[in-house]
Image (cartoon, grey):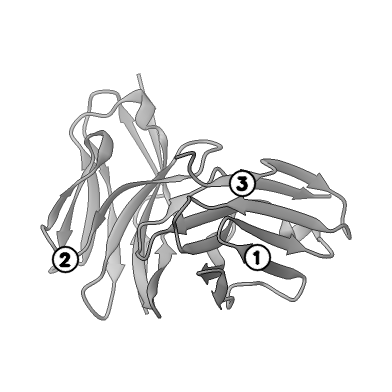
Amino acid sequence: DAGVIQSPRHEVTEMGQEVTLRCKPISGHDYLFWYRQTMMRGLELLIYFNNNVPIDDSGMPEDRFSAKMPNASFSTLKIQPSEPRDSAVYFCASSLAGVEQYFGPGTRLTVT
Amino acid sequence: AQSVTQLDSHVSVSEGTPVLLRCNYSSSYSPSLFWYVQHPNKGLQLLLKYTSAATLVKGINGFEAEFKKSETSFHLTKPSAHMSDAAEYFCVVSDSFGNTDKLIFGTGTRLQVFP
C-alpha cells in the first residue's frame, strides 16, 4: 500500500488567498483525521471523519477552515481566506476502526 | 481529561549508548499509550503501543517502553542508539471519544545522536 498521500507537499500563498489541502487515506480505512503542527502549539487535532461523515470538528480554529470528505478515498481541508498565523504543517492520518493511526508526510503551508 | 508530559525537550546521546525518553501520563482510567517518531520533514510513524496487555511493550527499531501504573510513566528506551534514531519522539495517550479515540500528543522530545 502506498500509505496516506497528501498534496501538495509545500504550499506558499499570500494572505487572503484560498488554500486547499488534499488527502488520500489508506484504502479500506474508515477513519480520517486532520492535524496541524506548529512550534507554539504542537500537534492539534482539527477534525475527524468516520465513513466520510464529520464526527468531531471542535478543533477547527474558526470559520475560515472547512473540511470535506466526498468519498472514502479523498478529503480536503480548505482555508479561506488564509492568514499568516495559519502557517503550519498539516497532517492527514487514517485508521481502520481503531486507534492506530497512519500519518501522511504532511503539507507545509506558508502564508505570507 | 487525559494528558501526557514529556519531561525532556531535548536528549543527546552518543552512538552506541542507551536511550531514555521520559513520559508521564495522566488518566482517570487505564489508558492506551503510544510512542510516535517523526524524522525531519516526514510524517509520524508508530513505534509502539500499550493497550492494557503486557506492561513491557516492544516496538520497531529496537525500541521498547514499560507501562508503570504506580509511577504513571511510559518511558521509551533503547539499549544502543544509532545515528538513524535522531528524530522527534512523541508520547501519546488516547482519549476515548465516541467510537474511536482521539490522540493527545505530548510536546515532543528531540533526540540527537552524536558519533
Residue under circle 2? B52
- Point out residue B89 in the picture as x, y percentages from the top left corner: 39, 46
Residue drawn 35% across and 63% down?
A99
Element marked by disc 1: strand
Location of residue B68 (image quadrant): bottom left
Three-letter amino acid code at the position of disc 1: Pro
Query: Which circle marks residue A6 in the picture?
Result: 3
Dot 1 falls on which chain?
A
Three-letter amino acid code at the position of disc 2: Ser
Crowd band around label 1 with a 10 angstrom C-alpha radius: few (<14), some (14–19), many (20+): few
Q: CA distance from mark 3 to mark 1?
A: 16 Å
- Point out residue B2 in the picture as x, y percentages from the top left corner: 35, 74
Element marked by disc 3: strand
Residue under circle 1? A70
Up/down of B114 relative to B42, above or below:
above
Q: Earlier in the sequence, mark 3 or mark 1?
A: 3
Dot 3 falls on which chain?
A
Up/down of B35 relative to B73, above or below:
above
